[in-house]
């Protein structure tokens, strides 16, 4: 049993140091830094790209919000990739004012494949764009999004994630859980790392990429989480991603548990795919480049599922030691609380702090705050399930309300 005690203490130190590092980094989000200087004062030309599969009920609202951008209308075009659609998404998008490309490929149906297919066409055309922004079909976009992304491009940044807000945070405890999660990521992950000179990550939607970045290889991704994969490949190459707090996109999230379970399962499977494909490359890049940015990227990939597995092992060791009378009931409870309180209760306090800092109304979110531990706990169950069963089906988010940009701006 002495070996179990040594292993337990070693794992406790690993977990403690990991979370202390995350805490120290997160605190850096509270510091407001000077804006980067403009390197080139230019009005760049953009593509707004929207991959869409059977999104007839929401695509019009997104196109409408993009047409209202506070940016010269001659300097950006709106493209909709109607991807394997069986409804009238293409027709509605055309009527709303978008340029529509219809794609039919029953074998390669992911968002990553759709982006790669479209961007390769534009690369072959040598299309006259400086950058592109990617949105999900159920988004609506703040009127200054492209203007603020243009500023980032002029500051020399070539891949930038915008602020991902939620357009339906109070619809259910599920959508509230997503909202709190993304608000936390926005400030304590992306902004904190941007302030420190580390690298944020692309976060699914509302991001900008300089066109030259993808011209050599297209949108070359192969996992279910093409956003994380693209980000990790950039970090491995030693290239930082940028962050734009004032480039805001409003995303719609599921309101039902079944849809949320399916969606988060896909994300977890995609994350596991990234772990399998890029952990070694991240470790090698950390060793060769010897930068904190590369080390932070490596910690990100091992800090998700591997850290979850490590915590499960630690809990199992505690129970084994208790059964073997190596520790008392009191010691077991103390150890369990040491892991459970940070996992389930601390996030509520963190969420309230973030909502105060970002001026989010707390009263409408009270139910979501109280249920947030349940939301996180269900995600832990999803992680556990995906360790053994990774077959997932894409399930369309049901759009229950017609939300326009004027409703959230």
Image (tube, rainbow, N blue to C red):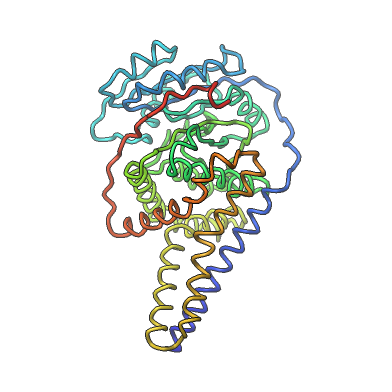
Say above or below: 395 vs 404: below
Say above or below: 380 vs 85: below
Q: Quadrant of residue 288?
A: bottom right
Percent coordinates x, y for residue 197 in the rendering: 66, 48
Question: 86 and 115: which one is in front?
Answer: 86
> Seen in the image, is 188 located left or right of residue 54?
right
Quarter holding the C terminus is top right
Question: 132 and 342: which one is in front?
Answer: 342
Q: Can you see residue 159?
A: no
Q: Can you see residue 285?
A: yes
Q: Residue at x 60, y 38 (%)?
A: 361
Q: Residue at x 55, y 46 (%)?
A: 185
Quarter holding the N terminus is bottom left
Q: Residue at x 67, y 54 (%)?
A: 27
Question: 84 and 37: which one is in front?
Answer: 84
Percent coordinates x, y for residue 365 in the rendering: 53, 42
Q: How many marks?
A: 0
Say above or below: 140 vs 358: above
> Seen in the image, is 357 located left or right of residue 49?
right
Percent coordinates x, y for residue 371 in the rendering: 46, 50
Percent coordinates x, y for residue 216 in the rendering: 46, 34
């Amino acid at each position: 049993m002495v070996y179990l005690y040594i292993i337990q203490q070693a794992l406790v130190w690993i977990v403690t140091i990991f979370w202390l590092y995350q805490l120290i980094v997160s605190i850096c989000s509270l510091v407001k830094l000077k804006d980067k200087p403009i390197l080139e004062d230019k009005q760049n030309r953009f593509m707004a790209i929207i991959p869409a599969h059977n999104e007839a009920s929401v695509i019009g609202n997104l196109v409408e919000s993009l047409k209202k951008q506070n940016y010269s209308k001659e300097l950006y075009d709106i493209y909709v990739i109607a991807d394997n659609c069986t409804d009238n998404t293409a027709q509605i998008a055309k009527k709303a004012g978008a340029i529509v490309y219809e794609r039919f490929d029953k074998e390669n149906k992911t968002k990553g494949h759709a982006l790669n297919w479209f961007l390769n066409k534009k690369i072959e055309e040598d299309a006259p764009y400086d950058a592109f922004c990617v949105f999900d079909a159920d988004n609506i976009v703040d009127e200054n999004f492209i203007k603020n992304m243009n500023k980032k491009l002029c500051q020399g940044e070539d891949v930038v994630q915008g602020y991902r807000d939620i357009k339906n945070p109070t619809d259910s405890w599920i959508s509230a859980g997503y909202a709190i999660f993304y608000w936390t990521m926005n400030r304590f992950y992306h902004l904190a790392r941007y302030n420190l000179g580390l690298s944020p990550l692309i976060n699914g939607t509302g991001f900008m990429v300089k066109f030259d970045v993808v011209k050599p290889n297209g949108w070359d991704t192969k996992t279910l989480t093409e956003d994380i994969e693209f980000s990790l490949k950039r970090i491995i190459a030693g290239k930082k991603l940028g962050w734009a707090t004032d480039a805001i996109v409003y995303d719609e999230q599921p309101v039902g548990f079944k849809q949320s379970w399916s969606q988060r399962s896909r994300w977890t499977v995609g994350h596991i795919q990234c772990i399998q494909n890029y952990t070694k490359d991240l470790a090698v890049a950390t060793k060769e480049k010897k930068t904190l940015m590369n080390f932070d990227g490596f910690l990100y990939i091992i800090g998700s599922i591997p850290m979850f597995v490590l915590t499960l092992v630690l809990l199992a060791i505690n129970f084994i030691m208790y059964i073997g009378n190596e520790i008392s009931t009191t010691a077991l409870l103390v150890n369990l609380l040491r892991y459970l309180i940070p996992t389930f209760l601390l996030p509520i306090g963190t969420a309230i702090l973030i909502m105060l800092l970002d001026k989010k109304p707390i009263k409408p979110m009270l139910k979501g705050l109280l249920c947030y531990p349940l939301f996180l706990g269900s995600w832990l169950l999803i992680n556990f399930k995906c360790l053994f069963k990774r077959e997932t089906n894409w399930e369309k988010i049901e759009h229950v309300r017609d939300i326009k940009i004027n409703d959230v701006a």
